[in-house]
Image: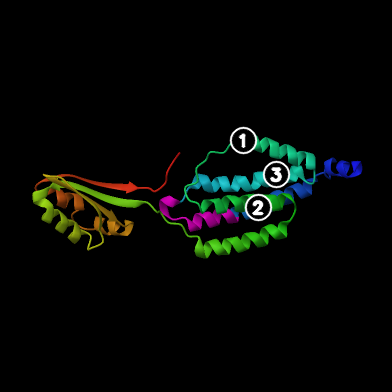
Amino acid sequence: MQDILFQLTEQSPEITLESLLTNFIVATVLAIGIFISYWYTHIGTAYSRKFNVSLLTITILTATVMTVIGNNLALSLGMVGALSIVRFRTAIKDSRDTTYIFWAIVVGIACGAGDYLVATVGSIVVFIILLFFGRVSNNNRILLIIKASRASQTDVEGAVFKQFNKKAFLRVKNTTVDHIEWIYELSRKALQQEKKKEHSITDILYQIRGVDYVNIVTQSDEISG
């Protein structure tokens, strides 16, 4: 029993410069593949360069930790204890981003342990899957909010209907004795097409008598804590 415990807690084999460089080179190459995959599958404002750079560093740092730990049980238990003290509160914007975090960690672990074939083949498979099924666009909604007098109801609704070619969807219509408030949902494509026209929707609506305000806002479903 004592011999088994001694073998588990004894120092791992000495790390050579060659093995260290190999671990880092393979980890860096695969991390660049993760970087490219995230950059390609995230469109527009859904892309975060800071998060993408973090994926690079996570891969290399994980490989560094695994290289140091090796087969040493004492070091691995110490590392678990140290990490349990740290509390990570970084909010993930999209649940699919957790896939990239786990991918970076797994690649780092495999490279640090010297399992380059596993890391490479696994990365190729994940890269192909995300290439075809993991494309992420901006999920923010664009809302057109209008408040006007009841007398201008027909003119306002007709102007919105005509300007966006039936691509503005009425989501909310609040009414009072004197006023009406409309909330339309627009697609980003519809808004871009509208900008190419001679007059914008705000210019057209403000020409209608009785319009109090026109707001165009972007609503995100993200909840920050």
- Classify residue 9 as left or right of residue 31: right
Q: Marks 3 and 2, how far apart in space?
A: 13 Å
Residue tagged 1: 86
Q: Secondary structure at mark 2?
A: helix
Task: Tell me, for residue 64, which label it has, or none.
Answer: 3
Q: Quick one: label 1 or label 2, which is nearer the N terminus?
A: 1
Query: Which amino acid type is shown beneath numbered disc 2?
Result: Val
Is the C-beta separation of discs 3 and 1 under 8 Å?
Answer: no
* Mark closest to the chain's N terminus, 3 or 1: 3
Is the residue marked by circle 2 packed among few (<14), some (14-19), or many (20+) residues within 10 Å? Answer: some
Which numbered mark, 3 or 2, is in the foreground of this view? 2
Distance between the Cα atoms at labels 1 and 2? Answer: 20 Å
Q: Which residues are magenta?
A: 33-46
Where in the figure is residue 224, as x and y percent of width and height?
44, 41
Question: Can the viewer see residue 11 in this picture?
Answer: no
How much space separates mark 3 and mark 1, taking CA atoms?
Answer: 18 Å
In the rendered image, the quadrant that contains the N terminus is top right
Question: How far across and down, in percent of the image, does residue 157 sit?
Answer: 16, 56
Residue 116 falls left or right of residue 147: right
Please name whichever residue, 222 or 192, is drawn nearer the observer in this view of the structure.
Answer: 222
Q: Are marks 3 and 2 in contact (CB under 8 Å)?
A: no
Q: Residue at x 65, y 37 (%)?
A: 84
Earlier sequence position, callout 3 versus callout 2? 3
Query: On the rendered structure, is 134 left or right of 102?
Result: left
Task: State left or right for residue 221 relative to residue 3.
Answer: left
Horizontal and vertical percent for residue 103?
A: 61, 53
| Amino acid identity at mark 1 | Val
Q: Are marks 1 and 2 in contact (CB under 8 Å)?
A: no
